[in-house]
Image: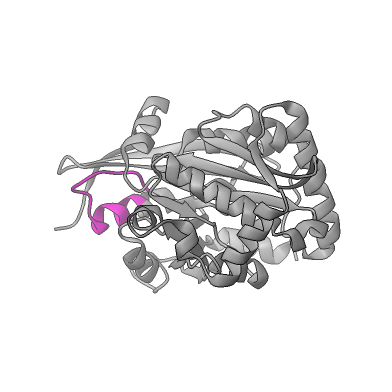
Amino acid sequence: MPACIRSARLATNSEWDEAARTCSHATFFHTRAWADLWASVSGLEPGALCCDFTDGQRLIVPFSLKKGRRGFVRERLLSAAGTYGGALYGAGVTLEHLLAAIRCLARGHSISWRLSPYEPYAGEIAVVLSTRSTNFPHSWKRHENSSETLALDDLRRNGGLLKHVHYNCRKQILKGQRAGISVRLAVAADEWQDFMGLYRDAVARWGEKATMSYPDKLFQALQILDPEACRLWLAYHEGRLVGGSVNFYHNRHAVEWLAAYDPGSFPLGVRNRLTWHMIEHAMAINGSIYDFNPSGTLEGTRRFKQTFNTCQRQTPLLVRRTMLRCALEWIGR
């Protein structure tokens, strides 16, 4: 039986917060805090579509509006900065409910959607939207990507992390310990400032290969997030900062987002030592998933993550362009 929307409106802040808190597959990237962060940094306008159905079901789809110079909406991002997005819902919601909500959200708008690997209907959604259909008259393009993940409950039951990782990974972790690399959480503004310097140096080294260079105000905004949701981990060797990673936490999901290292410290095992510590912490706080985040075209980064004996999960980017948007992009060439 087709799912029929009784009403569609913007969700209230409290409805959005409650949906993100109670949805079993929600990540930090589905929260209002993430959308508000990018509103303050890049002017994206946060919102969430609340769809109530005639059969009593409800779902909420967070998004961020990307506007042009004259204020016209150019695109709806189902999560800012290309991170996981999608609907928040509970038991009883079916694929038909989800597709009806996406049709409503996409009406007259371009959409970018990084499918979360934890979305129960992810496989079906990707197939339906990337196949031409009378229900979706504007074509969707599917760009493949994947994330490396660890099931922390399984690690606890099977002897812990060191027994799970590849031999060379374990060797590098132990090398970092012997080298005296210490790891701690950033608690002061000057520690964030030091990490920003490390990140700027890394961007300069990457040069044209850098996929993104984030502004200083993003790091300033990160500092004031809930410290239980956003943690900056720092690695030191002989009192000198040699690595760091910004991680996000929501419900039982921990995800790496942005890391930077001093390349001269790689032979000391700094990357493995820091990553090992972050995974061990996620296990200690009863996390169920440690997510390394998609690597895109960075094959070296992907191979490093796989040394932790991860499970690869698909995270395709689904992109829909309206005919008007395609025409404007063609004119702007």
Q: Which residues are magenta?
A: 87-101
Residue 169, quarter of the rendered image: bottom right
Give me the residue at 36% from left, 35% from top: 21
Quadrant for the N terminus in the image: bottom left
In the rendered image, the vertical position of residue 236 relative to residue 126, given as above or below:
above
Q: In the drawing, does residue 8 fall left or right of residue 243?
A: left
In the rendered image, the vertical position of residue 207 relative to residue 17, given as above or below:
below
Q: In the drawing, does residue 107 fall left or right of residue 19?
A: right
Farthest-out residue, front: 178
Residue 67 or residue 166, whichever sits in front: 166
Total number of numbered discs in the rendering: 0
Residue 66, quarter of the rendered image: top right
Residue 172, quarter of the rendered image: bottom right
In the rendered image, the vertical position of residue 243 relative to residue 188, given as above or below:
below
Quadrant for the C terminus in the image: bottom right
Residue 17 within the segment the image draws in magenta? no
Residue 167 or residue 227, whichever sits in front: 167
Give me the residue at 31% from left, 45% from top: 24
Residue 158: % across, % down: 35, 60
Residue 115 in sight from this viewpoint: no
Q: In the drawing, does residue 141 fall left or right of residue 88?
A: right
Residue 228: % across, % down: 51, 31
Residue 17: % across, % down: 40, 31
Give me the residue at 20% from left, 42% from top: 57
Residue 45 in sight from this viewpoint: yes
